[in-house]
Image (spheres, rainbow, N blue to C red):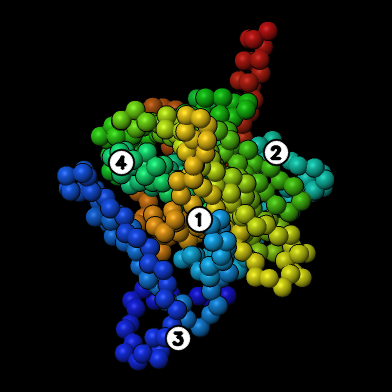
Amino acid sequence: MSVKVESNIQVNNNTNEQKKTKKRRKRKPLNFRNEDGKMMKDFDPKILESFKPRQVKVRNSRSIKISSYNKKNKKQVKDDWGRVPQCHTNGGWIYKNNEIVKNQRGIVWEVIKNLAGNIFKTEKDLATVTLPVTLFEPRSYLHRIFDSYSFAPLFLKLAAQQKDPAEKMKLVIACMTACLHQTVAQQKPFNPILGETFQGCFTDGSEIFAEQVCHHPPISAFEIIDKDNLYHLHGRLTFKCKYKGYAIDGHSHGTTTIDFADGSKITCTFPILHLTGVVMGDRIVEYISTATYNDPINNLSCELTFNPEPQGWIKSIFSTQEQTPSDMFNGQIIQKDKKNKEKVICEVNGSWLGRIDFDDQTYWALKRKLRPVDFLQYKDVLPSDSQFRQDLIELRNGNLDKSAIQKKKLEVKQRRDATLRKKARK
């Protein structure tokens, strides 16, 4: 289904034509001014431009039928939610580089043969499976982690200057949701080895650090320090990747904590990434399960449910109702009082491939000009930095065979070190 969107609305002088055109509800603009009326410190004008509400007109196509999830009026709203062309009709991000998909499928079949088909019978932890370097990108997982926080310098700097805790929570949720599409990639990063580090900075000057602190289970510690110390983002993640049947589930287990300069704190978790079409059919990335956000000081919380109206493939074939795209999510920001009574602050709806709305305000839209902040690696870093890994260097230079040899050397060394540590504990 193709949706053509025009951002510049042309005024029609014909009153009859105006009556036929349905008026869309205008979303309220956000007010990013302090109490004295001045714009906030270090505020990028591009952010303000991206938050301005815009009307859109949908032509020559049905809008996607999506529930508004509004408990008050229980109405359904027809809206394309600004979903980008890379979206599959039924939801999720579809890979369109067929050459890479074709090459990877041949390799995946070889891996399945080596496992004697057991991979279809039970869940298989891919961390225990040796994969060829042709499936990898020349980056370590420590590097990839910061793709999930690439909007932090924009949203979190703004959140740090909010006096309203609910507004701060909204900007954190918008930040983490906006980063989800940045995690979509067709190649796997290299697993970090124990003691490996990564060091760099965002282009705004915020510093980033990461270190592999545990081998089994694999735990990666990381932090982002704002250049003006307005916020400090940190956490420990264990990435688990399981394969069963024809799908892969990847999940960054762990909690991300954001400490703000005013003493407030918000913690959050990631949903599960679900990849289908590994060996046949369309290769689609979706997010399932939930993402949680908590502000323990102000008793605020939010749970976003991704793909809130899931349908099995059999039901989707025979159902006459229009399917809600799987990239949609919904939730509520809730605050508890001293008597533990809950109050709904606002409704949260959107698509991680479109936009996110808090009630009638849009805080982020993928089609708008707001883009993630790039980050750079330092040159003067520790010898343990991932940029010095020989397997990454060889793969970056296109030497697949040499990269495979170096990768195997590191794996053998890591297993030997693990054995020595185990003996030392006895």
Distance from Cα at disc 4 to Cα at disc 1: 22 Å
Q: Which of marks 4 and 3 is nearer the N terminus?
A: 3
Above or below for 59 versus 258: below
Query: Residue 204, relative to residue 76: is it above or below?
Result: above
Q: Label 3's element?
A: helix
Q: Is residue 319 left or right of residue 30?
A: right
Kindly identify the residue that appears in the image at 64 percent across and 10 percent down: 425
Q: In which quarter of the image is the C terminus?
A: top right
Q: Mark 2 points at which residue?
A: 125
Q: How far apart are marks 4 and 3 (CA)?
A: 42 Å
Q: Name the residue under label 1.
A: 349
* Separation (CA) of disc 1 from disc 2: 33 Å
Residue sitting at 38 percent across and 63 percent down? 27
Looking at the picture, tell me which residue is in the foreground, 233 or 198.
Answer: 233
Inspect the image, locate mark 3, and give the three-letter code of the amino acid beneath it: Lys
Q: Alpha carbon of mark 3 to alpha carbon of mark 1: how far? A: 28 Å
- Between disc 2 and disc 3, the foreground one is 3
Give amino acid for label 4: Gln
- Give x and y (percent) for residue 29: 32, 59
Residue at which label 3 appears: 20
